[in-house]
Amino acid sequence: MKTLIDSISAEVMKAFTDSGYDAKYGKVTLSNRPDLCEYQCNGAMAAAKEYKCAPFMISDKIAEGLKDNAMFESVESVKPGFINLKLSKDYLASVVTSMKEDEGRFGCDKTDDPKTIIVDYGGANVAKPLHVGHLRSAIIGESVKRIGKFMGHHVIGDVHLGDWGLQMGLIIVELKERKPELVYFDENYEGEYPKKAPFTISELEDIYPTASKKSKEDEAFREAAMEATSELQAGRRGYRALLEHILNVSVTDLKKNYDNLNVSFELWKGESDAQPYIPGMVQMMKDEGYAYMSEGALVVDVKEDTDTKEIPPCIILKSDGASLYSTTDLATIVMRMEDYSPDSIIYLADQRQSMHFIQVFRCARKTGLVDDHVKLAHIGFGTMNGKDGKPFKTRDGGVMRLEYLLDEINEEMLKKITENQKEKENLDISDEEAKKTARMVALAAIKYGDLSNQASKDYIFDIERFTSFEGNTGPYILYTIVRIKSILAKYQANGKDLPNGAILPAHSASEKNLMLVLSRFNAMMENAYEELAPHKICAYIYELANAFNGFYHENKILAQEDESIKDSYISLLMLTKGVLETCIDVLGFSAPDRM
Ligand code: ARG
């Protein structure tokens, strides 16, 4: 379905050409004075320069030309040359009716040019607990992926585990101190290694922090860990087998954590998977003359003439021949091109990594790892801060683990929901349902709290505000959906089927406003995809929820006497619910039946 703004523009452009002016001046925008009009066209001002006349002479003519157009209720020419438009109620009703008939899509067509897109997000580091820093990557990445899928693209999410760093060596060395008898440490062992991991997840969770602490205090321990890391990377059998175990145990635990966030990945690849691609890639970069030695390291220049700040060369190999974060990311590009030949790769990572991605992207392009048409994008996100404006910490100042944070919010939500239920005397809700509902609402609170900000901005994680049922919050959106669900359930209470007739022209300003907001859905979604901007969806559903609640408070719905009006209201509610639910699904959360 064409976007409403394009349909309106087409009419106004036609009026421009009919009056002898260039169509380009007929572009319409959403009104910035909703008190005066719904849409506006400011093209007469620009056209006046070309046609050397007063703008209002043009706007008058256009208004005259559009005055009998069935799309509009009113077209006004306002000095100096604005064209103010209000849509006819009949036309708007036909738009929302077609939206409702377009089940599941609500007028938002899938692309006719589907692209293959890899979204690299999550970025958890194996054996290290997920902390709140990983939360943003998971939340935003999941939504970006879902937006792409909704628009009809082939989108593949890859968690891209950090499984190739010093933490592996640290774990190996610490494990060796604890269990030196393990066969993995015997260099002469040639047999098969046991299938069962020599540790549980809770042991693993204890091993890493202990080792990390030791390495800061004990130089010899640190060196041993570095040595183990390079032996592992060089392919020592026993260590490779341990890596497998660490990965398996860790991934099982990570999946559970990501599940709780309603986040899932198509691919569970890690940095280690890219290693086999490094030698060939490095050789190519040398052979083709891109890479050269500088201060002992192998580098590729990536600066460009138009740079306004210094972009240092991309280091491919360190002086000791070891690979780096950039090497791994480049080799991962090689792997992804071979496996999926994607049209674009989108990375979610802290904004502070932006230089790294500039270097990697430029290097990949320059050395031909990707074709010109392949888009590489880094969505850099800001920091999640506590109320003190500093990076979010536990009460005692430690790094906040994701699980604890979720537990805390689930608990807070359960309290609120139980209170709410007492107030409403909904005492038939079981403890189990209350808990499940609390988890759903808590997730909405966290995700909406994050996604409603532009990704690049830092934001303050304010549990109280995020969990509030009022204001621009996830729970408020869910509350609105629950309210609609409950009205629909009451309507159906006596076995009555939901209506499927046309939605009637609006009977009140609040109803028309609701229709106006609904009719912007497809354009909003297209824009959110183009800009990879979930916050646009949040802003939209907040406006939609407000428009619905305005309508709800000003009109009798179930008590409406005229049955055809009542049915039309119910249809409008069904559409509103459908659009809201589609949006929150794309944001990565869902609504309970009651709360
Ligand atoms: N593991 C990294 C971290 O914890 C994030 C990885 C981001 N993705 C990438 N391809 N570099 O910071």
Image: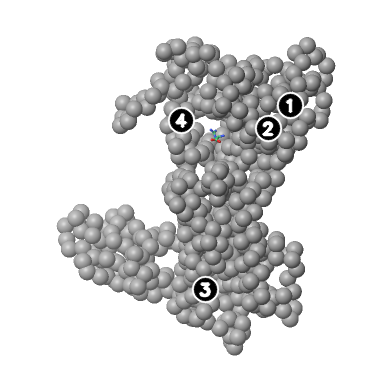
Say which residue appears at 58% left-offset and 72% top-offset: 573
Q: Are marks 2 and 1 in contact (CB under 8 Å)?
A: yes
Q: CA distance from mark 1 to mark 3?
A: 61 Å
First reached walking from the N terminus: tag 4 or tag 3:
4
Cβ of disc 2 within 8 Å of ligand 1? no
The amino acid beneath tag 2 is Ile
Mark 3 against mark 2, which lies toward the viewer?
2
Q: Is mark 4 within 8 Å of ligand 1?
A: yes
Q: Is residue 536 visible?
A: yes
523 in relation to 397, above or below: below
**Mark 4 touches mark 3? (CB < 8 Å):** no
Q: Give 583 or 55, whichever is nearer the viewer.
A: 583
Residue 515 visible? The answer is: no
Instruction: Decide: few, some or many residues near mark 3? Use Cα within 10 Å; few <14, some 14-19, many ≥20.
Output: some
Q: Which residue is mark 4?
A: 356
Q: Give the side of residue 207 with respect to residue 509, left or right.
A: right
State the residue lying farthest toward the bottom. Answer: 561
Q: Secondary structure at mark 3?
A: helix
Q: Which residue is mark 2?
A: 207
Nearest-to-viewer mark from 1 and 3: 1
Q: Residues within 10 Å of mark 2 (few under 14, many from 20)?
A: many
Helix, strand or loop at mark 2: helix
Mark 2 or mark 1, earlier in chain: 1
- The image quadrant where one finds ligand 1 is top right
Q: Nearer the viewer, mark 2 or mark 4?
A: 2
**Amino acid type, mark 3:** Asn
Q: Which residue is mark 3?
A: 549
Q: Is mark 1 within 8 Å of ligand 1?
A: no
Q: Mark 1 = which residue?
A: 178
